[in-house]
Image: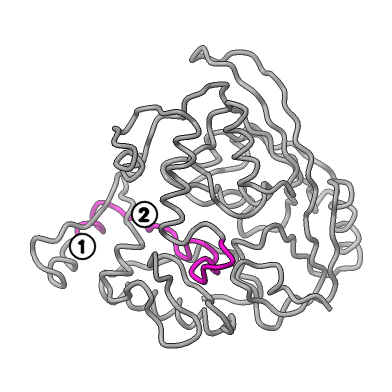
Amino acid sequence: MTTLSEYTTLRLGGPADSFRTASTTEELIAAVTAADAAEEPVLILGGGSNLVVSDAGFPGTVVLVDSGTVDFEEAGVDETGESVVLVRADAGVEWDPLVERMVAEGLSGVEFLSGIPGRVGSTPIQNVGAYGQDVAQTIREVLVHDRRTGRRRRMTNAECGFTYRDSVFKGDDRYVVCEVTFALHRSKLSRPIAYAEVARSLESEAGARVPLELARQTVLGLRRGKGMVLDPDDPDTYSAGSFFTNPVVTVEEFATVRERAAARLGADVEVPGHPDGEGRIKLSAAWLIDRAGFAKGYGSGRARISGKHTLALTNPGGATTEELLELAREVRAGVRAAFGVDLVNEPVMVGVSL
């Protein structure tokens, strides 16, 4: 019996009742269809980098998506005058090697998403993003298998319902992502820098464009410094990446957070917050966690906060899923008590919940 801890970056998760590998889209659809016909629960598994799986495992069929085709199509010139290339990638394609290839090919649009673990199929589900860039900005369409109708369907960007770290796919198992098409620009330069930390690292300004490879290497350096690039020799990378999303609050709620922060940390404290473009404020979950008393390396058990970044919960070795969740609940309760903000988990929970 296959143990799912072997397939998750947290190295957590019990056994699967049944385990299948799909090397093509046809095999993926066939495996899901067969499990549905048998009325068995189905778990679609990619790189396992965004999953928290129960210690009891999964009582059904786990399908490992291992399809690997990538195709290119020249798509003319857009309104900015830049050439557009459509990149169609199977769900099982490893994400960061694809980003590396896009950068080498001189295709701009995903360079700031370098170093993110996992596979292509998970990117639209989570609307994967980092450093001011997310996949919703470049996804043209997603080929899915609709388990309700039994048919394939191509969904446009608008139909995917992308919002911050969310989409119509998240929390709903109706659609199986089979293929993603990205519209990238043929350019030697990155998309405009949209993240202050990246701009500082490059000694540049927001809105500037830099060589693609420089953008990629800068982001990889930032991620490594936070333990966010998988490294078998670094226990801090045995995580699911950012465990909590950055909270988005109203202007009134932000004022309350600032009042609580002033009372707790001093009147001159500055609470980091950035407009989300829709009249609300996006807070820093990492800042809230740290200022609520959970520093890097926090934890007395086998599950700990990363020694490099307060937003990552890690399993340095020997922890259980329940121990990790106990730590997550402690952090969530502490932030709520300190600032009145409820943190929401970013990884997908399988057989467990906070």
Return the mark for residue 201: none
Identify which amino acid the numbered label 1 is placed on.
Thr
Q: Position of residue 32 (x, y in %)?
A: 84, 58
In which quadrant of the rendered image does the N terminus lie?
Answer: bottom right
SS assignment for the magenta stretch, majority: loop
Q: Which residue is mark 1?
A: 256
Q: Residue at x 64, y 47 (%)?
A: 95
Q: Which quadrant of the view contains residue 86?
A: top right
Q: Which quadrant of the view contains residue 315?
A: bottom right
Q: Residue at x 30, y 69 (%)?
A: 290
Q: Which stretch appears magenta?
A: 231-255
Return the mark for residue 248: 2
Q: Is residue 66 left or right of residue 139?
A: right
SS of the residue at dot 1?
Answer: helix
User: Distance from label 2 to label 1 (Cα)?
Assistant: 13 Å
Identify which amino acid the numbered label 2 is placed on.
Val
Q: Residues within 10 Å of mark 2 (few under 14, many from 20)?
A: many
